[in-house]
Amino acid sequence: GTAQWEAKRVDFTEKRMYLKFVSKVYQSEGAAVGDMVGLGLSVSNSESGHGAVTVEQLLMTLACLNGMTLGNKSRTAHLGGAKLEDEVHALLTDETKALDNQALASKLRDIVGNYSSTDSFDAAVTKFREAGKDGMTDDTTEKSLTDLSEGVGRVLNLSKPERASVLHSLVATLRQAGYVNNPINRATLTNAVTGVQNICNIDDRGLWESRGAKILNMSNSARGNFPVLQAA
């Protein structure tokens, strides 16, 4: 379609298959010069009865393929994903299962076509750029980065190991194009949260995608967890 989707990541776990796509044409600079982002899609499926086909629209950081949810998500059940021991599934003919697969393919075409719209992507890019101007600090000492990670942990109610993962990702973010040698801001923290996807369990990546969106859309009350974050 118009988005010209390109597969960037394929992962398998015992329960699910995960696909990540990025548009070749819907790309833009995010929070800073060199910080390129693109419209993305996440598709997951299970053939072992552990869930429906899920399609979600993402804002993707192109440097490391971190994703952040944009609020558009659909789940579609299908017969092919039913557990083998399911009594109803055992009663179905191959023809019925084939028809269900055709219906699923048609639904997914419509969903992906709808998620190719750039309205949500453009709005998220604008928010990301605004976040890049929010709460600048040049302090990259260990204490400062730890304090910021703890602030993220309070906002997202993270465990101690999860906060350590955010700190690890924050350090990595500061070495990334668009962030290296630049002050820390809310966009930096958002990218640090989504960046945990590179070190977490594959099945937990979707959780960190949604957590990144929570930092980007952080409420004024939540901002109190970050004394250094003052609106520019």
Image (cartoon, rainbow, N blue to C red):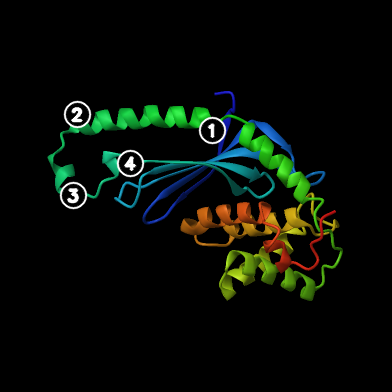
Quadrant of the image containing the N terminus: top right
Name the amino acid, label 4. Answer: Ala
Q: Are marks 2 and 1 in contact (CB under 8 Å)?
A: no
Q: Distance between the residues labelled 3 and 1?
A: 33 Å
Q: Mark 2 points at which residue?
A: 95
Instruction: Work out whether mark 2 precedes mark 3 in sequence or the reverse, and give the earlier one.
Output: 3
x and y percent of residue 106 in the render? 38, 27
Task: Look at the numbered disc 1 and give the secondary structure of its residue.
Answer: helix
Instruction: Work out whether mark 3 precedes mark 1 in sequence or the reverse, and give the earlier one.
Output: 3
Q: Crowding at label 3, few (<14), some or many (≥20) Cα neighbours within 10 Å?
A: few
Residue 129 shown left or right of residue 111 in the figure: right
User: Residue 190, located in which quarter of the rendered image?
Assistant: bottom right
Name the amino acid, label 2. Answer: Glu
Q: Name the residue under label 4.
A: 77
Q: Which residue is drawn at 73% across and 36% down?
A: 28
Q: How far apart are marks 2 and 3 (CA)?
A: 18 Å
Say which mark, if any, is on residue 86. Answer: 3
